[in-house]
Structures are given as C-alpha cells and as structure tokens.
Amino acid sequence: MTITVNSFFKKTFSHLKLFTLFFMICSSSYFIYNIYNIEKLQTKYITTLNNVYSVARRFGSFYNNTDTVALNTGKYLFNGVSVVVNTPTNAKILSTGIKKLRSNINQLTDDNIWTVAVFETASDYSHFDPLRPAYLKGYDKIAINTIVKNEDLMDTYRSFYGCNIKLTDIYKELGTDQTIRTIYYPIYNNKQLDSLLAIDINNAAFENILAKFNKNKMTIISMDNNNIYHTSELLPCSTVDPINLGINFYTLLKVTLLPSLLLLFLYHSLTQLIENKNFILRHDQMTRFYRRDYYEIKLINQQNFNLLIIDIDHFKNVNDTYGHEVGDDVIRAVTKRINNCIRKQDIAIRWGGEEFILSFSDMNKEQLRIKAQKICDAISLCPILDINITVSIGGISATNIHFNDAYKVADQALYHSKHNGRNQVTIA
C-alpha cells in the first residue's frame, strides 16, 4: 500500500513538473508572440488613421470646386445632409462630397463615423451629417477660428511636410455621453480660412481595430492599464491620448492553461504509445518476459553470469491431455509465479516454448541456489488449473565467461535436474 501511494505521488509530481514546463514554454512563447504583434497593431492604427486623413484632405478639392446656391435662413436637407443657415447667403451644397467622404471613412473604421460637419467662416451656415440634437444645440456657439488656433492649425497651408490636420483628445460629447475623437481639417483659399471640416469618430473604432486584429492574429493584446507589458504611442497628428497597448497577465494565464494541459496530454499519450510499441517489440506477449531475439545479444555481450534455465516438467503431456489453450494458460501461470519471486531489476526471458532464462545481478552461488529453490517451490506449491505443475531448474554462477559457455553449463545442470527426478534445482 505504501509503495502504491508513493508511486502515485511520485507520478503526480512528475506530471506537475511537466505541466509547469509546458506552461512556461507556452506562456513565454505566446507572450513573445504578442509583443511582436503589438508593433504590427500600432502600424495598423497609424496606417488606418493616415488613410482617414488622406480621404479627409481630398474633400478640400471637392469643396473648392463646388458651386453655391442662394439660401434663406432656415434648415435644409440635401441628400440626407442637413444645412443650417443663420443668415441668407450663397451656400455651397456639399452633400455629395460629404456622403462620399463618410462612406469611404466608414469602410476604414468599421462604420464608426459619428458625425461629419463643415463649418463655414465667411458665411453663417454649416453642414451636418447627421444633424444631431447635441450639434443643433451647440454649433452656433462654435468659434471656428478659436478651434483652429487651439488645435494649432493656423496657416497650415504653409506646411509642406507637417500635419495640416489634427486628431483631438478623447472626450465625451455633451448630451450623448458618447466617447469620441474629432478630426479637424481646415480648408484654406488664398491664405484665408474658408471652412473647417470636422469628423467625429466613435472611440469604439480603435477598439474594433484591436478586436479584429486579435481575432485574425490570435493575440490577446489589450488597452487595459493593468498589463504586465505596456507600450504607448501617439497617433499621427495627435499630441494627447496615445494608444496604450499591452498584455494582461490573467488573460495570458487563462489562454495558455488549456494548450499546456493539451501538450501534457499529447506528450503523455505519445510517450505511452512509444513505451507500448517498445514493450511489444521487446517482450513476449503471452508471458510479458523479454523476447529471446531481443535479449540474446545483450547476454552475448556479458561476461559475468548468475543464470537460471527453467523448464516446465512434462509440458508435452499437458498439451496432449488438456489442449494447447490450457497449455498456454499454464505457461502464463508459471511465469506469473516466477515474476512474483524475482526483483524488478532481474531479467526474465522466454527462451523457448516452455523454457525460460533468468539473469540476476549482485548474487553469489548460494544466493542463486536459494532463489532457484524459491521459484521451484512457488510453482509446485499448489496446482495450476487443477493440474500439478513442476519445473526443473539448472543454473550457473560464474565470471569472465562467454554466454555460450555459461549456457552450456546451465543447460547441463538443467539436464541433471530433469534426469534426477525433476522438480528440483541444480547449480553448477
């Protein structure tokens, strides 16, 4: 019982060590993989936003080449775009360009454009797609020049390489509590600010990019603050609210736990399969003893021997009287009793049909004789399948001798046991 319990704990501890190893390999590999992909995700954000900026800048050309129509004070709807006029004026009808701009940017941001607005400076009118209550309430209080100044977009027409567009910080829109960021693009003509394009992007667009990236790349990158690895980078044409990316420890633990268990299972299954295959190749299937064709070469390479040859007495009579199936059962029972008499490190070989060789280490001649007698007595002690079964044993204890010579001596000893009445032991 103690051996069984110790064996159980030893096996459990071994599996635990293996699982820990597999978990460390899985988690560290996956951790490195995620770190590698964070840079790719940052590039994805930058590329997406630069594409949005490119679409926004192209709107300037459309704006400059659009004719005007006379509109009185009021609200108008052109192709789903609202135009709010405070004083009668000649207004540009920008609905076609705004709709196209919105469609193109929605494709880049997974339909996360909240509002597209164009605020005029020279005339008191503005465009909204859509005209939401929050905008309707507050647009007339917007000082376009103040926004341009605060966002550092003054005289951007002079800039050749710099940002002539601006991404604001994250804020919640009054009245809706939507978390958004706004892209401002000033449109200049003849060094004069004509209008300001404002594109409100729902901040979920950045979360959606992260979610799709994680799905496609099978990563666990997060925007959480409690990450074991953290990196931060400003988006193009932005000076605040960088994109924070990292790897959460608990998510890493949760994701790599199952693969680690699976690896342990596969490892255990594979090693068990190899062990079973090796056992079949090396062992006789009936007796579970070593096969002669496997172990004989090892005996040939030995020089010191404590060897027993065991042969079942009158086995042919058993087969002739009871049949070969009973004969096979007798062999199984005999080898089981032999196995109960020897140590784990002792070698048992099925040498022939009913003949077996046992090889022992660290024994002298007297110990070998005692062991042989114990085996002989264990088999004859009680019948097998109601048949009185005995064995004859011959053995040798010698050093610096070739196996063939040792075998001949042990075989002669076996011959002596058989012709001297059987069910006995002879050690040369």
Image (spheres, helix red, strand yellow):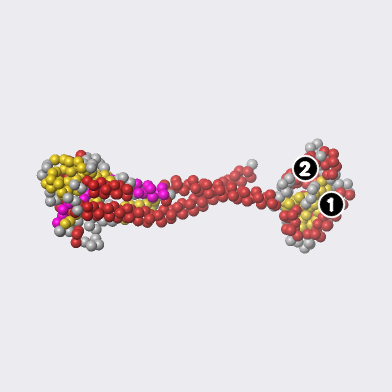
Q: How many marks?
A: 2
Q: Quadrant of the C terminus?
A: bottom right
Q: Earlier in the sequence, mark 2 or mark 1?
A: 2
- Mark 1 neighbour density, 10 Å: few (under 14) some (14–19) many (20 or more): many
Q: Answer yes or no: is residue 11 visible.
A: yes
Q: Which span of residues is magenta-colored?
A: 192-216
Front residue of 89/355: it is 89
Q: Which residue lies under the disc numbered 2?
A: 328
**Quick check: is 276 in the magenta stretch?**
no
| Nearer-the-camera pick, 251 or 359 | 251
Q: Nearer the viewer, mark 2 or mark 1?
A: 2
**Extreme residue in the left direction:** 88
The residue indicated by pointer 1 is 414
For the residues labelled 2 and 1, say whether their Cβ atoms are less than 8 Å apart: no
Toward the viewer: 336 or 263? 263
Q: In the picture, residue 325 is in which quadrant?
A: top right
State the image coordinates of residue 169 (x, y, percent, origin top left).
25, 50
Q: Is residue 369 visible?
A: no
The residue sitting at 54% across, 48% down in the picture is 264
Q: Is residue 196 rendered to the left or right of residue 36?
A: left
Kindly identify the amino acid type of the residue bearing the numbered disc 2: Asp
What residue is at 27 percent from the left and 53 percent from the top? 55
- Image coordinates of residue 138 in percent, x first then y, are 17, 43
In the rendered image, which quarter contains the N terminus? top right
| x and y, in percent, of residue 363 in the image | 75, 55
Q: Which residue is found at the position 49% from the left and 53% from the top?
A: 25
Distance in Å between CA atoms under marks 2 and 1: 22 Å
What's the residue type where badge 1 is placed?
Answer: Leu
Point out residue 288 in the picture as x, y percentages from the top left corner. 71, 47
Question: In the figure, is residue 386 to the left or right of 34?
Answer: right
